[in-house]
Amino acid sequence: MLIIAYSCQIQRIKNEWTKEVFGDADNLTEEKVDEVLKKFLEDFKQGSLETKGWPKTGGAYVLSKAAMNAYTRILAKNYPTLTINCVCPGYVINAITGNTGLLTAEEGAASVVKLALLPNGSPSGQFYHRTEVSSFWLVLCYVV
């Protein structure tokens, strides 16, 4: 399973509890991720995102990427016989980037296809920027 990703900086989240939950890969569970998302929604409804350390703009976008990243790690741990990873294909020229990307669709797709064809036993629960393993904290992802 491959999850396609686009860039978003985790540093925009100042909420330390959230960083701790998402950063503790060994103890990460779906319930913990859901708890973070519920807290974000609660703070959103109360109009207290900024005071609670959530991103000032694009908070839902940033949290959705962090959650997808976390779910990728959880899936990889729960299904060790599968290879489950996230990938950012790079800054691709397309409608999402307003056609301002640096890579052609073919160049972006090449890294996705390469990773989708990884053989059994390949690293799992990883985040790739193009074809290189990257930190979950640098770039977040979402399913396409």
Image: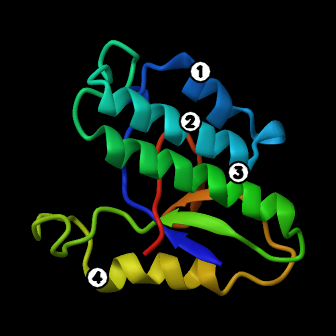
Residue 14 in percent (x, y) is at 43, 19
Residue matched to label 4: 105
Q: Which mark is residue 99?
A: none
Give the residue type that dot 3 points to: Glu
Residue 144 in percent (x, y) is at 43, 75
Q: Element at badge 2?
A: helix
Give the residue type that dot 2 points to: Val
Who comes first in sequence, dot 4 or dot 3? Answer: 3
Residue matched to label 2: 36
Q: Within 10 Å of the Cα at label 4, are there few (<14), some (14-19), or many (20+) other Cα atoms?
A: some
Who comes first in sequence, dot 3 or dot 1? Answer: 1
Residue matched to label 3: 30
Q: Quadrant of residue 6?
A: bottom left
Q: Within 10 Å of the Cα at label 3, are there few (<14), some (14-19), or many (20+) other Cα atoms?
A: few
Residue 84 in percent (x, y) is at 70, 70
Q: Within 10 Å of the Cα at label 1, are there few (<14), some (14-19), or many (20+) other Cα atoms?
A: few
Residue matched to label 1: 17
The residue furthest top is 51
Is residue 77 visible to the viewer in this orientation of the structure? yes
